[in-house]
Image (cartoon, rainbow, N blue to C red):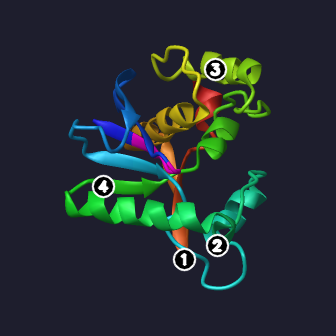
Amino acid sequence: MIAGIDVGKVCHVAVIDGRKIVYVGTLEDCDIDFEFAGIDAPLSFPKEGYFRECERKLHKMGIRLLPPKFVERIARKGMEIADRLRRKGVTVYEVYPFATRVLLNIAPRANKKKLEERTKILKDLKRFVDVRDFEDHNVIDAIISALTVRLYLEGWGEIVDGEDGSILIPKPQFRLVQ
């Protein structure tokens, strides 16, 4: 099974098995074992400047994001979660749900914080996961994080890396085949 974790004050987690969502809730309350996890938070900081090399590569692909230093608290919490999971034997990846939305055309222009636009995201997400109507955008990010890892394990993802970090994304050509 694969977990997607949205890091914040409350860490939301979605655990999927294929297309099926088997758990949605907080990481603290999750008692389901999973082998892989996609964490929606920077898991490293740039060696210099604002952006890591992997983030500069995403910029060149047209994917916008905030520098890790702007979300330092979330990044540090994500790093702690990643360390804890790795000690349990979980394979951990940094993911960025917005990049997945852009690359898979999952309502890439929709504002996830607006109910009407969140509905568009969920509608498009149903092409990949058996998802019901979740109101919390953090839960939706957790589901997309798990989906990103699933696609990678199925051969439809790639790691955008650099000397100071890496981010797992769907292969851009995947949207042409589905």
The alpha-carbon separation of the residues under discs 3 and 4 comes to: 27 Å
79 sits to left or right of 100: left
- The residue that mark 4 highlights is 91
Front-most of 74 and 170? 74
Sequence-first disc among 1 and 4: 4
The alpha-carbon separation of the residues under discs 1 and 2 comes to: 7 Å
Q: How many marks?
A: 4
Q: Which residues are magenta?
A: 4-9
The alpha-carbon separation of the residues under discs 2 and 4 comes to: 22 Å
The x, y position of residue 33, in whole percent, is: 21, 40
The verdict on residue 57 being magenta is no
17 sits to left or right of 146: left
Sequence-first disc among 2 and 4: 2
CB under 8 Å between callouts 1 and 4?
no
- Mark 1: which secondary structure? loop
- The residue that mark 3 highlights is 124
Q: Quadrant of residue 22?
A: top left
Mark 1 residue type: Asp
Mark 4 residue type: Thr
Q: Is residue 120 above or below residue 161?
A: above
The alpha-carbon separation of the residues under discs 1 and 3 comes to: 33 Å
Q: Quadrant of the N terminus?
A: top left
- The residue that mark 2 highlights is 53
- Mark 2: which secondary structure? helix
Residue 172 shows in the view: no
Front-most of 15 and 105? 15
